[in-house]
């Protein structure tokens, strides 16, 4: 298995990606918003899920940045805050025209999970009086007129567990009707699909959906397609294909051995 | 231990020994022929000067009264030529190089669990748990405790000492004494006696959480999901009947009802009920299969990310990510 994953990485094998309708729902939720819309991005994951979720988080950042959306970053996981920093690094290096405080802002981690969501749906300043740099929200151009997150046009949640997408659905999307999309780990994905389309506008499930999302962005914005850093998820689909192929072969082989053994009376 | 398991263990050790020796040879070869395991950086100056109106603007020629600092950007492999190094614009960053080696070594320590439980794995595991706990505690103090509790009880002090951007005009908010008392009560858990005192804040916390979650589940997972499950089985569009949405609606209805019947244990699963429950099991198995498939995909993605780090950032076999 190690070789099945390592060889495609070393060989830089990249396979074509077909974009599914589910991925297009997420893409369109961001793309169809007027430029400069307000988007809340909550990074509810940590380095343990970085390999699976960071590519889609970075793709969200690039898509929002190229559309000129106002990006409000926050984290419900303590180690989600450094993940937000990685996206802010991306904005600073790839979109130097965007200005902190005017185009993007970061709120620090707050403990409480669903209690934080519940609070900011009513009163943003009740939880975040200052941004992560210690500046009052009243002195930041993009936050001074925000009362609560009901003023957001879209919530993007990148989730690895609890608190995560389920809590955003329960405490923001369902009771207040705030349009929400999710990018989540593969383990969570089957639990999130029932929320589509009424409670979630779309779900990106695991690295495959992240690769599809990158491909969708590339089609509309060719300038991003030339950036190798924006192809991370697509690159990781090579090892996926080979490793899954190996697993399928091993399952078939195991079944053949089982049935042959049973026929011979060994099992 | 019997002979077969001992032989299996020996062969495993041999295989892994060979892999590590090959890896070490590749590492030495790579270090001798390239900049393996090195991080080179270029400095970037930032400077802001105050105008007559007191507002700051960027300047390329900072004076001693201006605010100035330097950040260091990593030079990608493709841009790191001998000319760049000789010109002095790129310098070897020892701190980042050491960090890179630590990350690589700890990754290998964790992966060494594949051979079996060993001291290297245990050391890395303890480091991850320890540093995570320490980091979370520091984050908790500065991002939560100071602004949301201390800042409410002693706003003037917090504004002066820690958070100059904070608005202290509201003054002391005495209501926040209650959570402060609950925190102190919680710490009694660590005392040799009086541990029962900590049960009160724990009970309060559990009660609040249960209340919150009950509301969330009833609204989003019960009422909204029942509503979402009530769909027309005969879907029509502009040109009349539409097959696939109708098919999906039928599958949704059959799967929901049959899976629910499977969990209905008050009546014995016989006859029509038994057959319907059987269909429910099939739908459940398909769901579990999808979950398992997604889980495998997630785990492979994590492995691929670590190997990309080792092959790219550390060994430079591929362009670093």
Image: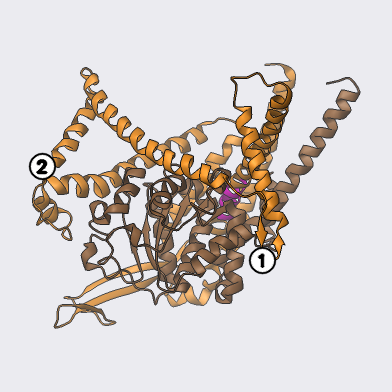
Please state which of residues B255 and B195 is positioned toward the viewer in this rendering: B255
Predominant secondary structure, magenta span? helix
Q: Which residues are magenta?
A: B300-309
Dots 1, 2 in contact, CB < 8 A: no
The front one of A178 and A164 is A178
Q: Residue at x 47, y 42 (%)?
A: B223
Q: Which chain is brown?
A: A
Give the quarter of the image for residue A208.
bottom right
Residue B238 is labelled as: 1
Q: Is residue A113 visible to the viewer in this orientation of the structure?
A: no
Q: Is residue B301 magenta?
A: yes
The answer to whether A40 is drawn above or below residue B63 in the figure is: above
Q: Is residue A236 above or below residue B68?
A: above
Mark 2, residue position: B174
**Residues beneath discs 1 and 2 located on the same chain:** yes
Q: Would residue A254 be visible to someone looking at this image?
A: yes
Expressed as whole percent of the image width and height from the top left, the position of residue A32 reads 50, 70
Q: What chain does badge 2 belong to?
A: B
Tell me, for residue B118, which label it has, or none: none
Tag 1 secondary structure: loop
* Residue at image location 15% in from the left, 59% down from the top: B164
């Amino acid at each position: 298995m190690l070789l099945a994953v390592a060889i495609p990485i070393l060989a830089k094998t990249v396979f074509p990606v077909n974009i599914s309708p589910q991925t297009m729902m997420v893409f369109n939720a961001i793309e169809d918003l007027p430029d400069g819309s307000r988007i809340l991005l909550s990074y509810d994951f940590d380095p343990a899920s970085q390999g699976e979720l960071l590519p889609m988080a970075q793709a969200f950042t690039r898509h929002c940045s190229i559309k000129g959306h106002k990006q409000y970053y926050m984290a419900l996981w303590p180690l989600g805050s450094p993940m937000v920093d990685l996206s802010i690094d991306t904005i600073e290096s790839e979109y130097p025209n965007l200005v902190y405080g005017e185009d993007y802002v970061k709120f620090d981690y707050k403990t409480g999970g669903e209690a934080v969501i519940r609070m900011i749906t009513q009163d943003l300043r009740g939880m975040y009086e200052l941004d992560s740099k210690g500046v009052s929200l009243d002195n930041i151009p993009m936050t001074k007129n925000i009362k609560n997150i009901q003023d957001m046009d879209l919530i993007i949640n990148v989730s690895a567990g609890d608190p995560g997408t389920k809590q955003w659905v329960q405490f923001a999307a369902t009771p207040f009707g705030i349009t929400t999309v999710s990018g989540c780990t593969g383990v969570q994905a089957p639990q999130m699909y029932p929320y589509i389309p009424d409670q979630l506008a779309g779900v990106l499930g695991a690295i495959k959906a992240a690769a599809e999302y990158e491909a969708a962005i590339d089609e509309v914005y060719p300038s991003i397609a030339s950036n190798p850093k924006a192809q991370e998820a697509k690159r990781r689909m090579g090892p996926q294909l080979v490793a899954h192929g190996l697993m399928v072969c091993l399952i078939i082989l195991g079944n053949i051995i089982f049935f042959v053994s049973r026929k011979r009376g060994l099992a | 231990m019997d002979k077969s398991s001992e032989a299996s263990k020996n062969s495993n050790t041999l295989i892994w020994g060979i892999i590590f020796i090959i890896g070490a040879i590749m590492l030495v070869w790579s270090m001798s022929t390239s900049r393996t395991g090195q991080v080179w950086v270029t400095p970037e100056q930032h400077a802001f000067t105050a105008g007559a109106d007191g507002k700051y603007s960027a300047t390329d020629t900072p004076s001693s009264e201006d605010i100035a600092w330097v950040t260091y950007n990593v030079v990608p492999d493709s841009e790191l030529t001998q000319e760049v190094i000789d010109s002095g614009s790129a310098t070897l960053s020892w701190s980042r190089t050491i960090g890179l080696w630590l990350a690589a070594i700890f990754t290998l320590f964790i992966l060494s669990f594949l051979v079996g439980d060993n001291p290297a794995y245990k050391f890395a595991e303890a480091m991850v748990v320890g540093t995570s706990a320490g980091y979370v505690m520091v984050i908790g103090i500065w991002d939560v405790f100071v602004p949301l509790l201390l800042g409410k009880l002693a706003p003037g002090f917090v504004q002066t000492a820690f958070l100059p951007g904070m608005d202290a005009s509201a003054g002391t908010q005495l209501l926040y004494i209650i959570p402060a008392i609950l925190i102190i009560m919680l710490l009694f858990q660590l005392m040799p006696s009086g541990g029962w005192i900590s049960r009160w804040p724990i009970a309060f916390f559990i009660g609040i959480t249960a209340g919150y979650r009950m509301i969330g589940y009833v609204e989003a997972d019960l009422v909204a999901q029942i509503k979402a499950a009530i769909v027309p089985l005969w879907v029509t569009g502009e040109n009349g009947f539409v097959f696939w949405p109708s098919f999906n609606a039928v599958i949704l209805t059959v799967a929901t009802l049959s899976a629910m019947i499977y969990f209905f244990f008050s009546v014995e699963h016989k006859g029509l009920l038994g057959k319907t429950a059987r269909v429910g099991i099939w739908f459940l198995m398909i769901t579990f299969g999808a979950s398992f498939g997604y889980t495998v995909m997630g785990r492979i993605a994590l492995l691929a990310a670590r190997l990309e780090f080792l092959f790219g950032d550390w060994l430079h076999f591929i362009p670093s990510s």
